[in-house]
């Protein structure tokens, strides 16, 4: 098997330069590529176009990149759990394109599956439809939405092997597999990097062919955004 | 007049055995607490889970296991996890029997506005546009009037739309109303102690009232 | 959880009537719904339109239904490991629509994902493109292909639980998950039916929401079409 | 002149370290036997497997584990299994570096015909149309002439097409030829003992011959 291991986040993101379009997996703060984000902050790369369902919070996730003014544009479905985000948006420093969550996911999948465009009814009759081609199938209107074209995809998996195969844990899966398929270069950080053969082929969520670089991350904080609990009796 | 839990309780009565249900944030989330005994439902969370369980016990939170509201939750026996594309795939292909969500405005032809107020910071539509565009059965849970005392059941929505011609039923603190295929809110039930006249005054869109409008039965 | 268990194949296929469009999972004889096929043969239902990658062999798989003249039309990518198939085709008793394998798979997926049509370059410039809409994206031509509309999908899984969740084993996965998503009514036969909770939620290939009926099959033959081996030393 | 194994051996030299490769049925399958030492490749089988291993030892066949030719095979450390939609998804999105397949005819502009002979029982295109429409690099492995002695390298294909303008290279028992972007078969190498004239005679399409055409080096 092909060995795709790099030493760490710094090496993995070495060629992400200013102005690149990058996808970042995760839903809220769940399943985000923490190590890659830290490395991008450290590197100080600028003018990034970030495709990610959310934009982090003030002091975590993509919020860390926003604070350092590294993001030119966010393409997301839900943002603004984040005061700095709001400030930059209102001041015009930051551009935001809001798209329906399912459209976001499916435009990733389209890229990974080599489909240049897909049809979805989400947004028909709303401002999301403005300027888009509408097409009727079986009496129902659909918008034609294009596959994303991203230079890099940064994803976080639970386990991965040196051949790039990935396994996700629970709902931290979310956008990670579809983004892993969609990047021209896909970088995976994993909590546990294992030898090829240690992952059951039937349990692999993302086949290694989609992953170009992989490394075992460290110091995962895995912050919880809304800690909701019940008490025992 | 119902409180939020009352609205949730009334909506819970719409749920049939075997339903797959997607619950939005706010009042819809409360519906889970009132699902009648003997009724098996599976809750979908659009971040990638079927079979959402209750909140974890204190100390048992798992950062990798959250719902679409980013709250820590649990799985149940029979739960399944999937990615975001499949999650919206099953929504788009109408495998979810019922969607319950909140709204800022609903119009008499079933349009809904619930994501954007011009001039205010816009957080985004999240999965709402996908849900309303595809769900075969959508119930809106909301207050009948807004904080300024204006009706949220309108002839036409004034706010930017989330979806058109998609809402089938509205449950508020005052009433249960169906949206008629030809347009108009058909008053089905009054909240306990609420008069038809009161509902008429609180409804700006076309209200269709039969001779006899029963009071809700909540238990 | 909702209990979707039926007593067996006969009950599962009870309402598959003459002229219905059914999908059958499997690749060659690998991962085919053996029990459902037997029940359909026993029931004697006729004029079926079968969507399946292959058409079985003379005495196994869909070949058993062909022998009893139950199939009006096959929609497949590769057929004819089967003398009776060839005879019926040449005599005009059987209609065949051949479509590229990836198009077949993706039209299933499109149905399961609520996408009315997809774009694929497969078949551009060939007779497969005849009468189809061609569209150019980024300098490359694609055919627009429609989602399948099947009354029933019959799939075979390794394990399943009573809530309808399915797990497939090795390459017997093939078309099964995409067809499971695509049937208006999806019937799953499994080698081992377990209680909800026994399958790891992270390992489920087909979530139960896509499966309407499930039963534990019996007497699986799992025939091998091409037994290729090497000898030790 | 090469035998089938010779053709496979020559094609194997085109494979680079780290390639993901899809091998068609026939001669292409044999290529797996000649992959040079130190070259890591991952074989894709379009029925849903990356990392195809050798045939199983006798008695260890698994009916659930086959390749696209329906042969019993094995997995390797690092293999992954997926469904047919993902399999063709990765083909369509050009994640497979090299596709090697057989052909009945190839034309000088890169068209290929390999699935249908009018008047004969048609078995179908299987995954061939998907592969040739999407693969970024396709090598055809075939005999230079058919059983009737007619060239299979043509100006235009006479048989129904599998794909247009897609073949980059052809390796036959006689020669290695590139298909030029502007059209034409560029003769790159002769099989051991085969003359340029012999290749000219066996090639019906436009043949572009440089002054010096080296003999293949197979080892």
Image (cartoon, coloured by chain):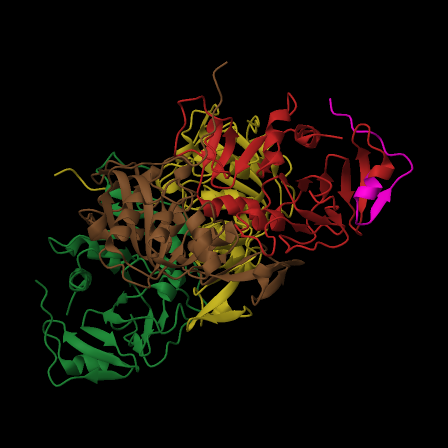
Chain colours: A brown, B red, C yellow, D green
Camera-side residue of A136 and D31: A136
Camera-side residue of C55 and B5: B5
Residue at image location 62% in from the left, 35% down from the top: B28
Residue C9: image x %, image y %? 55, 32
Q: Is residue B126 above or below residue D201?
A: above
Can residue C159 be seen? yes
Name of the residue lying farthest toward the top: A233
Q: Is residue A66 above or below residue C35?
A: below
Q: Is residue B131 above or below residue A228?
A: below
Name of the residue lying farthest toward the right: B211
Is D28 left, or right, of B165 in this rendering? left
Residue D137: image x %, image y %? 28, 66
Residue at image location 83% in from the left, 46% down from the top: B207
Q: Is residue B48 above or below residue B157?
A: above
Camera-side residue of D99 and C206: C206
Which region is colored magenta? B199-219
Is B57 left, or right, of D56 in this rendering? right
Can residue C78 be seen? no
Q: Is residue A25 magenta?
A: no
Q: Is residue B204 magenta?
A: yes
Residue A2: image x %, image y %? 20, 50
Is D40 left, or right, of A137 in this rendering? left
Residue at image location 69% in from the left, 55% down from the top: B158
Camera-side residue of D185 and C78: D185
Residue C225: image x %, image y %? 36, 44
The rendered magenta stretch, by its main secondary structure, is classed as loop
């Amino acid at each position: 098997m092909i060995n795709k291991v790099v030493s760490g986040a710094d090496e993995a993101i070495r060629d992400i330069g200013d102005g690149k379009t990058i996808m970042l997996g995760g839903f809220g703060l769940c399943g985000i590529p923490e190590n890659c984000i830290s490395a991008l902050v450290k590197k100080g790369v600028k003018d990034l176009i970030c495709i990610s369902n959310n934009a982090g919070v003030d002091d975590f996730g993509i919020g860390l990149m926003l604070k350092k003014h590294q993001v030119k544009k966010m393409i997301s479905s839900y943002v603004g759990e984040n005061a700095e985000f709001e400030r930059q948006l209102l001041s015009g420093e930051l551009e935001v394109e809001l798209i329906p969550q399912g459209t976001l996911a499916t435009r990733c999948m389209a890229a990974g599956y080599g489909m240049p465009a897909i049809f979805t009814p989400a947004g028909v009759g709303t401002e999301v439809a403005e300027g888009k081609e509408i097409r009727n199938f079986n009496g129902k209107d659909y918008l034609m939405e294009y596959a994303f074209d991203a230079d890099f995809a940064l994803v976080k998996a639970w386990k991965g092997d040196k051949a790039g195969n990935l396994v996700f844990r629970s709902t931290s899966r979310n956008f990670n597999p579809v983004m892993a398929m969609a990047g021209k270069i896909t970088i995976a950080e994993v909590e546990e990097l294992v030898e090829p053969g240690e992952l059951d082929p039937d349990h692999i969520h993302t086949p290694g062919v989609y992953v170009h670089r992989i490394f075992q991350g460290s110091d995962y904080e895995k912050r919880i955004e809304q800690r909701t609990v019940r008490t025992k009796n | 007049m119902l409180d939020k839990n009352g609205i949730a309780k009334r909506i819970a009565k719409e749920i049939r055995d075997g339903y797959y249900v997607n619950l939005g944030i706010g009042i819809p989330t409360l519906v889970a607490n009132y699902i009648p005994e003997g009724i098996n439902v599976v809750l979908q969370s659009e971040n990638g889970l079927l079979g959402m369980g209750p909140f974890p016990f204190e100390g048992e939170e798992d950062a990798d296991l959250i719902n679409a509201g980013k709250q820590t939750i649990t799985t149940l026996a029979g739960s399944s996890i999937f990615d975001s594309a499949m999650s919206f795939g099953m929504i788009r292909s109408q495998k979810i029997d019922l969607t319950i969500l909140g709204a800022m405005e609903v119009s008499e032809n079933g349009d809904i506005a619930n994501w954007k107020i011009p001039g205010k910071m816009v957080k985004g539509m999240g999965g709402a546009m996908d849900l309303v565009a595809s769900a075969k059965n959508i119930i809106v849970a909301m207050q009948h009037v807004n904080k300024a005392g204006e009706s949220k059941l309108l002839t036409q929505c004034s706010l930017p739309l989330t979806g058109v011609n998609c809402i089938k039923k509205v449950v508020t603190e005052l009433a249960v109303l169906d949206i008629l295929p030809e347009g108009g809110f058909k008053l089905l039930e009054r909240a306990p102690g609420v008069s038809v006249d009161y509902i008429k005054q609180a409804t700006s869109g076309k209200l269709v009232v039969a001779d006899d409008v029963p009071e809700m039965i909540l238990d």
